[in-house]
Image (cartoon, grey):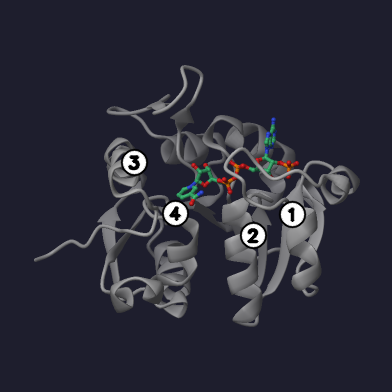
Amino acid sequence: MKIAIVGTGMVGQALAGRLAELGHEVTVGTRDVAATMVHTEPDGMGNPPFSAWAPAHPTVKLDTFAAATADAELIVNATSGNVSMAALTAVGADNLAGKVVLDIANPLDFSNGFPPTLFVKDTDSLGEQIQAAFPQAKVVKALNTLTAALMVNPKLLADGDHSVFVCGNDAEAKRTVTDLLESFGHTDVIDLGDITTARGTEMVLPIWLRLMGTLNTPMFNFKIVR
Ligand code: NAP
């Protein structure tokens, strides 16, 4: 499948690398290709910049947000929640129309430091805001509840015996995303319902962040026992 990843950070890199390994044609989108390739500083969490990651992944292309997504069949939103709307606006409504948009972003507000708060919650969610802003896109919220390494390689933990969620209005789009997650090794993909259910998966972030602090590692996940 032709897949565009909007976002050059650790999530974009993890998704791009794994999807390319699985044989997909992957292009990563960025604001400014030249600036991204000369940027050599790690991000705030110490993760390597895209320019350091790219040489080991020669089949993954890099282009502007709009060009990367123009002929993609599936688009992944892997940008900070507070800039997702700006990034997707740069992608353009035409490039999003009719396509599956796998939204991994979390609506985290770091303006008052750590732990962050959620800038949308309870009665709305970032997933819903993206769906409302781009009504012709088929938004599926998924993978925002676990760390990047486990999103794409669930078997790194408990042989993959843990859960992920899909939320969205379009059943076929959720099937496409579920197939993708299963190709990564996920075995318990729970369809929560329409895009309003993204409120729940975004609102687990406060407990996720505190677990990371207590366990001192991001290598954990939720398992829904039933
Ligand atoms: P990130 O550092 O949060 O975002 C990087 C991307 O944001 C870059 O592509 C950057 O563009 C773009 N960006 C920054 N400012 C922008 C602006 N003003 N306008 C448009 N685009 C802008 O990436 P991340 O750490 O990989 O996280 C991606 C998302 O996944 C976040 O929403 C995060 O909450 C969520 N998430 C992360 C994890 C994890 O393990 N880290 C787990 C679950 C969910 P350039 O390429 O041009 O610099």
Q: Earlier in the sequence, mark 1 or mark 4?
A: 1
* Badge 1: residue crowd in 10 Å (few <14, some 14–19, many ≥20): many
CB contact under 8 Å: marks 2 and 1: yes
Type of amino acid at the residue the image marks with label 2? Gln
Give the distance between the C-alpha atoms of the residues marked 3 and 2, in whole angstroms: 24 Å
159 relative to 129, above or below: below
Q: Secondary structure at mark 4?
A: strand
Type of amino acid at the residue the image marks with label 1? Phe
Position of residue 51 in the picture relative to residue 7 (left or right): right
Mark 1 lies on residue = 50
Residue 77: x %, y % from top left: 58, 49
Residue 111 visible to the viewer:
yes
Give the distance between the C-alpha atoms of the residues marked 1 and 3, in whole angstroms: 26 Å
Residue pushed farthest top?
Answer: 112
In front: label 4 or label 3? 3
Q: Earlier in the sequence, mark 4 or mark 3?
A: 4
Q: Earlier in the sequence, mark 3 or mark 2?
A: 2
Disc 1 residue: CB within 8 Å of ligand 1: yes
Type of amino acid at the residue the image marks with label 3? Gly
In front: label 1 or label 4? 1
Mark 3 lies on residue = 213
Disc 2 residue: CB within 8 Å of ligand 1: yes
Residue 58: x %, y % from top left: 80, 73
Quarter of the image containing the C terminus? bottom left
Give the distance between the C-alpha atoms of the residues marked 2 and 4, in whole angstroms: 20 Å
Mark 2 lies on residue = 13
Residue occupying the point 55% across, 50% down = 137
Position of residue 135 in the picture relative to residue 193 (left or right): right
Nearer-the-camera pick, 189 or 60: 60
Residue occupying the point 66% across, 75% down = 20
